[in-house]
Structure formats: C-alpha cells, structure tokens
Image (spheres, rainbow, N blue to C red):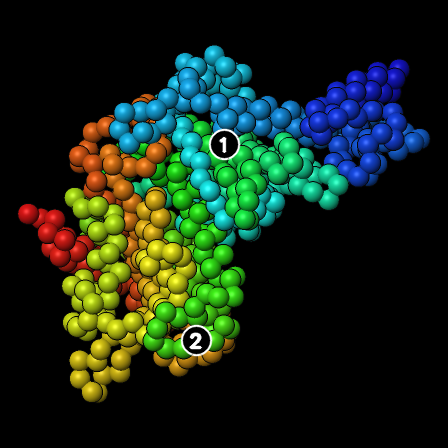
Amino acid sequence: AHLRIENARLKDELERVCSLAGKFMGRPVSSMGHTMPNSSLELGVGGINVISSDFGISSPIPMLPPHKSITMSNRSFERSMYLELALAAMDELVKLAQTDEPLWIRGFEGGKEILNHEEFSRTCAPCIIGMKPNGFVTEASRETGMVIINGLALVETLMDSNKWAEMFPCIVARTSTTEVISSGMGGTRNGALHLMNAALQVLSPLVPVRELNFLRFCKQHAEGVWAVVDLSIESLGGPPFPTCRRLPSGCVVQDMPNGYSKVTWVEHIEYDESVIHQLYRPLISSGMGFGAHRWVATLQRQCECLAILMSSTSPATDHHTAITAGGRRSMLKLAQRMTNNFCAGVCASSVHKWNKLRTENVDDDVQVMTRKSVDDPGEPPGIVLSAATSVWLPVTPQRVFDFLRDERLRSEWDILSNGGPMQEMAHIAKGQDHGNCVSLLRAGAVNSSQSSMLILQETCIDAAGALVVYAPVDIPAMHLVMNGGDSAYVALLPSGFSIMPDGTGGGGPVSGDGSGGNGGSGHGGGGSLLTVGFQILVNSLPTAKLTVESVETVNNLISCTVQKIRAALHCDN
C-alpha cells in the first residue's frame, strides 16, 4: 500500500515535471513516449530516469526502497522548483528589457531611465523570491549598447563561469558553477540552467564584496535572439545573512550585421545600504556601481579589445620598441595577472588569502592587510602588505585618469619615478581610446651608478570608470616576455588606482529608484571617487614577523600619494 501511494505521488510529480519541461523547451513533453529527441535535460524523478537522452522514460520502472525514492524525488522536486523559478525570472527579464514607458520613465537629468515601481508591481508577478527584506533598498537600471561580439559567443561566455570572470575582471571577483541542472538541448545553450555562486566587487575597500548564490538560465527566443537571466536563491553554505539579492537580472542579446550584437542589460537589486560607506552610497544607488551601465561599458571595452587583438592588421606597437606577436601575447597575459591581483588586493576578494590588520597607527579609512608569499613564481617571496583607501576629489574622472597615466607627470605623485619624467618604451593598444593600453615605462636614472628600472602599466577607461595599474618589473625578465617567453615566472606586486564617478550627477544613463538614501545630495556632480592601492614586500623572509614600522611606512606612503595627487590637481583650493 505504501509503495502504491508513493508511485501515485511520483506519477503526479512526473506529469508536473513534464509539463514544466514543455514550457522550458517551448514544446510539449510526454511523460510516456519517446517524443523529444536530442536533449540533455535530465530530471531524474523518484529513481526513474524520467527524461533520458531521448526524453522518454526508461522502462521498466525500477522499484526502489521507499526511503531512497523519497530522497531522489526530493532532489527532483528541487530541480523542478529551480526550473519554475528560472522560467518566471526569464519572463520578468524579457518584460523589463523590452517594455518602455510607463514601466521605465526618463528622468530629468541626463535622461536616466528610472523604473516605475508602481507600474512594475502592477504588470509583473509578485516577487518570485519573496518580500524585500527589512531595511533593504532597491536599485534598478537598464542599458542598451552595440557590442562587437556575436550573440552565440556572448551566450557561451556568460554560461561558462571562467569566461564570464575573464570578460568582467573588475566586477567579478570570483565565481564557480555549483551544479549544471541542464546543459541545454541539441548541443546548444538553449534551455541551459546552472546553479552558480559569485562575488561581485566595486574597487574600493569601502564597499563590501557582494556574495551571491543564483540560478542562471539561458533561452533562445527567436533566430538570433537570446536571453540569459540570473535570480538569487538562498542555498546551503551561502552567507547566513546576505546583504544583497538579485531579482531577475541579465541581458537580451540580438544579432546585428557585421558581427555586432545589440545588448539590453537589466540589473534589479535589493541590498542593505548600511554596509556601504557614506562616500559610496550615491554611486551605488545611482546604479553606476553594480548597475547595467557598468556591465555594458565593461563588455563593450573588453570586446573591442578582443577584436583589436584578433585583427591581423593591428599594430604590434604604435612606436618605440618592436615586440613580436608572441611577445605581445605574453605581455598582455602578464598585465592581465597584474590587474587581477590589484583588484584582489583592494577588495580582499579572491586570488590570495589576506588577513586584515587592526592597528592604531593607521588612518581610519585605510585598509591594511597582510599575507605570506611562498612558492609562487609570479611574485617575490616574503611578507606582503597591502594598503588601500578611497577619497573624493572635486575633479572629473577623465581628468584624474589623464593625469595619473601621463608618464611625463609621474614624478608629481610617484616616488618610484626618481623625481624625473618617465619614458614609454613599448605600447600595446587595447582599444580605440588611447587610454586603453598596456605599456612599458622606464624611469630615467638620476646618476650613472643607478640602474634604470622598468614599470609595466595597464590603463583602461570606459563610460563607467577607469583604472591605472602598474608594477616594477625586472629588466631581464621583461626582455624574455617581449620575445614571447612565459610570463608566469615574472615576479611582480601591483599598485594603482581605480577612478569612478561620484554618482551625484553628470553620470551616464542609469538610475536607482531613489530609495537609496542620499542619492541626490553630495558634491554637486562631476566629482571622482579615487581608490589608491599599494602592495609592497616588507620582508623577503616569509617567516619574519610584521613590524609596526613597516605598517606605518605603507600608511605614510598611501597618505603622501593622496596628498600629492590632491595638490597636483589643485583640489585643496
């Protein structure tokens, strides 16, 4: 009798899963016949291989002991629940991406689009993942842009966690795929459903990294039209009290002529504003920190870079030292590692395990961390200190960026420059904007006994912000790299700057809903948020003890650099 009840329950469950799978695939799925070829969507229910490679059920149905079939049916129930959530999230994303007024209304300043929350509540189903937590605020943004990548390639990038992190290195601190619930059908990504986790970052020690567990679902809507949606879900092993959750967010991608795609990106987030420093609240609530504007700007810049590097006509250098094609690849790979390590040092997010220091002799808003470097050929062994701080400057991000990347003005802030101008030895373009490049700089020697030093530098700028990252490098090691040698053995510790608009005005076409606190107050538009980060080897013995003096030295270095930049840009008038 028990088995009969269990089997009847499983049969109902099977019918439900099949009807769901039908919605998921956009065509009917029978629970009894071999009706649907070429699918790798396996939804095992109650120990029955319900949907095998041909979407029929394996027969005869094995009779499993009750306890085992219950656990397996629980597993299948969880999967069908994920599927239901993914389908609802996809509907909501498409609605948000494709509907204009009155769902999105144009704001007055800068033509920002603002989500009309009344209209949203009226037209969209109640929140799929439950009520907004107490004290959370909402941020919604939408951005459309032309990107030099075809839709299929972009979908492939988004559905592969490693490629996704590589495409958005300054936003995605780390990510992994927890489970592939479905890999898609017919060898494509249509119907792919993944359970993932990620840490997203704004490059500042004043903004905590956002830890997320989410479903990512991909669906082809028409020939050349794809959509990829994310939806936060709480999972075991996730943060006990998440400070943020993503409502249906993602992008709709439409193929255009000449290898371009039209990408409409939507970010809809609820988060706890109290964990963010006052200085950064306007930026985050305006949607410029984690919003659609930043995702699209990064995507456009990265795809432009890939297109330039892949085109056979691209110049190996604009001038100066000749670099072979292999040397160019090695140098770019080294710069990529340098920039990733810089981001990780500012946000304490991934690449290395940092320990935060609490010391009296450090300024309040300077974050100091330490770690031991052992057996890593890519950096010097010993004790590494990282210090980072963020400050507001009454100057536009473009002006701050142009000043910091100009090798002729470097001596105005950089103590490594030996007090004189630096010279650019090699230059690899990474975009149409001259500011997107990797270069090799040489400091002029003050006297003949001093060896001149090389600095590897990567600079990038887009509509959402800019980055200047650099590291002193060994001359013989760089010669090897420029001739195509392996860059993994070049030891470097990065330092640099992240520059973002202050979010109080004059920004790009994105917006929050105004529930983000003091979104409109602040410094009167056009200012910058500058993050300064240094990583320094304070002792070449990994076993050495960290001294108070070395912490003070790094703290002084950072405050002195900030003062010099302020003075050079006439910020203290």
Residue 215 - label: none
Identify the residue shown where x is 47% and y is 12%: 122
Picture quadrant of residue 406:
bottom left
Image spot of residue 513 (x, y percent)? 35, 24
Between 16 and 10, the residue placed more toward the observer is 16
393 in relation to 443, above or below: above
- Earlier in the chain: of badge 1 and badge 2, it is 1
Mark 2: amino acid: Ile
Residue position marked by numbered label 1 in the rendering: 249
Mark 1–mark 2 distance (CA, rounded to whole Å): 42 Å
Between 163 and 110, the residue placed more toward the observer is 110
Question: Does residue 152 appear left or right of residue 279 in this picture?
Answer: right
Mark 1: amino acid: Ser
Q: Is residue 526 visible?
A: yes
356 in relation to 24, above or below: below
Image spot of residue 315 (x, y percent)? 43, 68
SS for dot 2 = loop
Identify the residue shown where x is 32% and y is 32%: 286
Picture quadrant of residue 334:
bottom left
Outermost residue toward the left?
573
190 in relation to 573, above or below: above
Between 103 and 540, the residue placed more toward the observer is 103
Identify the residue shown where x is 18% and y is 62%: 413
Structural crowding at the residue carrying mark 2, measured as other residues with C-alpha within 10 Å and reported as few (<14), some (14–19) or many (≥20) = many
Outermost residue toward the front?
257
Image spot of residue 333 (x, y percent)? 47, 65
Identify the residue shown where x is 54% and y is 27%: 94
Outermost residue toward the right?
60
Outermost residue toward the bottom?
449
SS for dot 1 = strand
Between 237 and 271, the residue placed more toward the observer is 271
Residue position marked by numbered label 2 in the rendering: 323
